[in-house]
Image: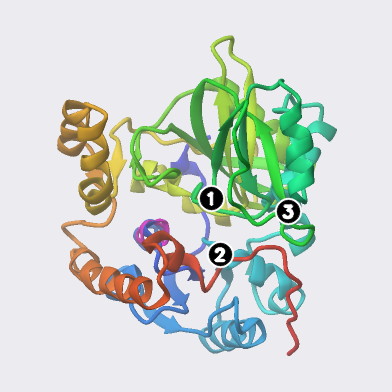
Amino acid sequence: MSQDTVTVRNQTILLTGGRAPVTLDLARQFTKAGHRILVADSLQHQLCSASRAVVKNFVVPAPRTQPSAYISALLEIIQTEQVDYLIPTCEEVFYIAAGLAELQLHCQVFAEPLETLNRWHNKWLFIQRMESLGLVTPNTWLIESPEDLEDLLKNPSPQKLVLKPVYSRFASQVHFINKPIAALPNIDLRPDKPWVAQEFIAGTHYCIYGVAHQGQLRAFAAYSTVFTAGAGSCIYFESVHHSGLLHWLKTVVAAEQFTGQIAFDLIETADGILYPLECNPRAISAIHLFNLSDRLDLAFLNQEMGDHLILPQTDRPAMIAMAMLVYGLPAAIASQRFKVWLTAMMTAKDVIFQKDDPLPALHLGFVMGQFIAMAIQKRQSLQRVSTQDIEWDGAPINVSL
């Protein structure tokens, strides 16, 4: 079945997370496919604010601090604008999941309930779920106190560990520990803020992404880590064709009967074994690998695709050009990979600038200025402030309407 033979009527779609490049990309792809796109975000300046692909932008309350007001604002947009689909893109998906019962009375919501999403977002529950499916996983331990960590470090095997909070993002709090160590890392370990310790697995790191309906994978893309902003957030994306990764994701979404967007970080060892590290039940930058002609909108909206799977049909890499300059260039120089970086800059497409939609690239200065001001005021990193109002770290979400 080709995309030309699959049709779907035009829809009014509300995207959340207008600050994210992936949301801008989805807005452009959906609009070119004939859909009417609205965007909501709790930031005043968003990447999508200036895009001609977006009919209306809405500034809504911050979901982390005002979850009830956030859901109420979305409901008002949905009813006023006669929204057909609500598609979350970033971590606001957890707050939307908490309000799912009310939201899905008024439109289709592309998200699972919060309990399901937590099984993927929580790094300890995620590994347990993978093991229950019979999949190979790294040896992983739940760490709730300094004593737990001390006991683990007394054992000489494994010789290298990766330590990270149960709820975290961007690899911003990851610690690599080589045994023996002279002193414990200075981290806050307590039962209400648990961490996981994971056996370090050497190999090739992949990010994989899928769009699924009731356990059937509708779209798939994968890329390996080349350039990152800091320790974990990728800023350069080159499509990888890997049947093993595709089969792995099909197995997982089928077992869970999952509906929504889902992404995983995996390590492939030299002997071809895939080890899942963590999961992001939301959009990731693999969306940038799809072109307009791939019709990614069909994966979200069409319920009658049969076995048809949408894959990126071009091998041209993509990048966030500003991040490649700010983060990629210094890292390339430090690691003596300047020629690799230069080739990447010359061959990849920028995911923000488009000739027929140039204003988001110009508006990027306002977006970054907003984040810089927040970072200075809160004394936090740019990555941290970019998501601090939408993050969810497992606390109960009280949505009362």
- Marked residue nearer the N-terminal end (3 or 2): 2
Where, by quadrant of the figure, is residue 395 drawn? Answer: bottom right
Rendered view: 56 above or below 263: below
- Marked residue nearer the N-terminal end (1 or 2): 2
Q: Is mark 3 on a helix, strand or loop?
A: loop
Let me know if residue 214 appears in the view.
no
Residue under label 2, please give it: 87
Distance from the alpha carbon under mark 3 to that under mark 2: 30 Å
Residue 324 locus on image (x, y percent): 25, 45
Q: What residue sits 61% from the left and 39% below the top?
A: 183
Q: Residues within 10 Å of mark 3 (few under 14, many from 20)?
A: some
Residue under label 3, please give it: 194
Residue under label 1, please give it: 173
Of residue 33 and residue 329, the one placed in the foreground of this image is 329
Let me know if residue 227 appears in the view.
yes
Rendered view: 143 above or below 273: below
Q: How crowded is mark 2: few (under 14 residues within 10 Å), some or many (20 or more)?
A: many
Q: What residue sits 64% from the left and 32% below the top?
A: 276
Magenta segment: does it hold 25? yes
- Marked residue nearer the N-terminal end (1 or 3): 1
Q: What element carries label 2?
A: strand
Query: What residue span does the magenta drawing correspond to?
Result: 22-28
Residue 131 locus on image (x, y percent): 80, 32
The answer to whether the residue labelled 1 contacts the one labelled 2, judged by CB atoms less than 8 Å apart, is no
Where, by quadrant of the figure, is residue 228 drawn? Answer: top left
